[in-house]
Image (cartoon, grey):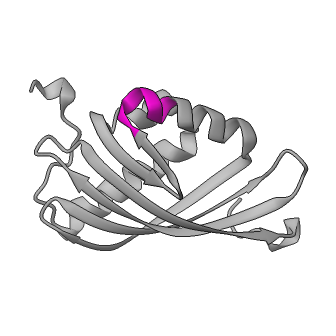
Amino acid sequence: MNTEEQRHPLPPFTLETALQKVQLAEDAWNSKDPARVSKAYTVDSQWRNRTQFINGRNEIIAFLTEKWQKERHYKLKKELWGFRENRMAVLFKYEYQDENGQWWRAYGNENWEFDTNGLMTKRFASINDLAIEEHERELK
């Protein structure tokens, strides 16, 4: 694989590089740019997002495009929970407003696995939603 297909930092991760990887992911997702986000994943990456199974960059782009059309004012915060070699566990929460004006906070965790080039091969997310009032927002 050429260096254009690498996504630094590369595994095996240290605390410093794991924290960096999480921050890069948070920044990409907060851009709300599906193509940008998809570049962190292998072309055949496997996702479980709630009850939905998503495979490959094209499906990732389609999923995120639809997601961010519905989730207005989206803002995400990720936190490293743990890591080992090429795997990470991440906690997250995000807030958004739906098409009807209702605010939501979603909490969850993700398990990530990376290839040797630093691209994510697997992302398994468990997510719970909580309806909130606008004044209860924590992420702005």
Answer with the quarter of the image where residue 68 lies: top right
Q: Main secondary structure of the magenta part?
A: helix
Please state the horizontal and vertical placement of residue 63, each as a whole percent of the image. 55, 37
**Of residues 9 and 43, the one drawn nearer to the viewer in this rendering:** 43
Q: The magenta stretch spans which residues?
A: 55-61
Please state the horizontal and vertical placement of residue 4, each as a whole percent of the image. 19, 24
Answer with the quarter of the image where residue 42 lies: top left
The answer to whether 139 appears left or right of 21 in the picture is right
Please state the horizontal and vertical placement of residue 90, each as a whole percent of the image. 39, 67
**Of residues 137 and 87, the one drawn nearer to the viewer in this rendering:** 87
Instruction: Evaluate whether residue 107 shows in this view.
Output: yes
Image quarter of the C terminus: bottom right
Image quarter of the N terminus: top left
Which residue sits at x=81%, y=73%?
A: 136
The answer to whether 56 appears left or right of 18 in the picture is right
Which residue sits at x=15%, y=66%?
A: 14
